Amino acid sequence: MKASTIISRLSGMALLLSLSSLAMADVTVTDGYARATPPGASNSAAFMTLHNSADQPVTVTSVSSSSAGVAELHNHTNNNGMMEMRHVEGITIPAKGEIQLKPGGYHVMLMQLKHPLQEGQQVELELTIEGQTQPVKVEVPVKMVMEGMNMGG
């Protein structure tokens, strides 16, 4: 086999390995929880830390939950002194880094809850990662947290 053919094949294999490592980005979740809801509330939020062990940044593009009719990625922004909550198209986790989803910042909004969220229960979440075929599935506990509890009703 010619040296140029071997180099070409090795270059092609390196590219495939590089692409497959990007497609298999290792996103893990720690410190997750969802807020318990007061009676009659139809919305809640989930918070967590997202870790990316890949050499490239990865983006969470959507979220779903069996506990909610609608689940969305949201962020709080300061608009002329007024805090506003807005839907975002994605949350990018830096290469070899992490990002916190926390009150007052990025979070998962759980809307049209199918049942009240009570302390001690678990909430299933599926995070879709750009370029990955399989979502990241996680269960987070429901906790009674009152600070910043304006989730609409």
Image (cartoon, grey):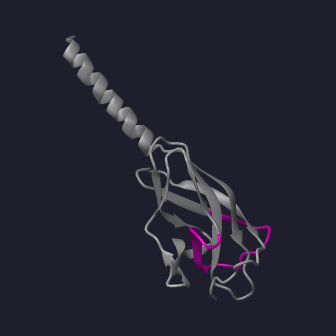
Residue 22 horizontal side relative to residue 12, left or right: right
- Name above or below for residue 9 compared with residue 122: above
Whether residue 72 appears in this view of the structure is no
- Name above or below for residue 4 compared with residue 103: above
* Coordinates of residue 149 in the picture (x, y in percent): 70, 81
Rendered-image quadrant of the C terminus: bottom right
Residue 123 in which image quadrant: bottom right
Magenta residues (range): 103-124
Residue 99 horizontal side relative to residue 147, left or right: left
Q: Residue at x 49, y 77 (%)?
A: 86
Q: Residue at x 41, y 39 (%)?
A: 20
Residue 2 in which image quadrant: top left
- Name above or below for residue 138 compared with residue 20: below
Q: Residue at x 40, y 51 (%)?
A: 131
- Name above or below for residue 26 compared with residue 70: above
Which residue reaches farthest front?
Answer: 80
Relative depth, front residue between 115 and 97: 97
Q: How many numbered marks have been drawn onto this rendered protein structure?
A: 0
